[in-house]
Image (cartoon, grey):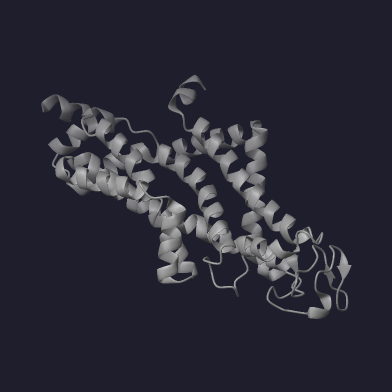
Amino acid sequence: MTDLHTNVVETEAVPVPPVSYRRREMRRAFQSLVTSRWALLGMLILLVVTFVAIFGPAVAPFDPNRQNIMMRLLEPGSPGVGDLTYWLGSDQLGRDVLSRLLYGARVSLLVGVAAIAVGGTLGTVAGLVSGYFGGWIDDVIMRLGDIQLAFPFILLAIMFLVVLGPGLVNIILVLGIGQWITYARIVRAQTLSLREKEYVEAARAMGDSTFSILFRTILPNIVAPLTVIASFNVAGVILSEAALSFLGLGVPPSVPTWGSMLSESRDHLLSNKWWMAVFPGLAIVFTVLAFNIIGDWLRDFLDPRLKENG
């Protein structure tokens, strides 16, 4: 007990200046990002998509839901009313594809980030409790996860959305709850290996509460793998949202999304109206690819072995 207390005091006697440490890590992250061409490309794509999601409605040339049958199925670059131009063409109802694409970016990013926040929070708390306490609590949480994994996720999502009805909040909750077991298993495994470490034993010896041990001692040491998994899962959630919107189970039809745009283009693919499917499809592909590239870079950047070698 005395040795543990002494080690904690000695460690705290020479703390690393937090500001200097953050600056050093930010500088190292910037250098790593700049030297990695693919990671830099992925970050630029994400910045563009984020900018479009935030400011897209302000720069969209048309109302995304404005219908004009006289302007239906125009090719990209076709002139519109006055000085306006359908740069990416129009759909079967005469709505501007570019405007709907800009508005759809907001929905895709919002669903992706919010669903990961919901699933990540639930899974992290469940994994911490499961790994730290063990016993019957661990068995119950893990068995619930096994039951969920026994069913195809897309079928579960369809079933819940059919019952709850389409809607932005409903799809975020369904996609978020579907992700929790991934985080729970990772956090549980990390907690099992960390709960017997010296600094955790020292925290117990000093009288720290269970809440403090879980969220101030253990959780900061497992943030790195959670960050990597979250970056990959955002891409998967965006694809799931697009698939559900394609099936008509996503957000209401009045809200433009990339998945619903693909669904609406099905009847016109054979009539050579390629722009209705190509542009939303490319938006999904590049956004998902960017998140996957950033996930790969984060995995390498947060690897402690590479930190030591660097």
How many discs appear? 0
Q: Is residue 239 above or below residue 11?
A: below
Q: Nearer the viewer, residue 264 or 51?
A: 264
Residue 61 in the image: state x and y as whole percent.
76, 71
Res 216 quadrant in image: top left
Residue 100, horizontal then vertical, whole percent: 69, 67
Q: Judge from the rendering whether residue 14 lies leftward or rightward of residue 301; answer left or right.
A: left
Apparent side of residue 64 relative to residue 88 in the rendered image (left or right):
left
Q: Residue furthest left?
A: 1
* Residue at x-position 61% and y-position 60%: 259
Q: Quadrant of the N terminus?
A: top left
Q: Find residue 5 and report its image quarter.
A: top left
Viewer-nearest residue: 173 or 197: 173
Residue beneath the point at 46% across and 45% down: 230
Q: Look at the picture and state if 286 lies above or below 259.
A: above
Q: Residue 4 appears at what percent x and percent y?
A: 17, 27
**Left or right position of 109 against 22:** right
Residue 265 shows up from this direction: no
The front one of 152 and 178 is: 152
Is residue 10 shown to the viewer in this render? Answer: yes
Q: Nearer the viewer, residue 114 or 33?
A: 114
Residue ID at (53%, 39%): 295
Please tell me whether residue 227 is drawn above or below residue 81 in the rendered image: above
In the rendering, at what x and y percent does residue 262 appear?
Answer: 66, 60
Residue drawn at x 68%, y 54% is: 281
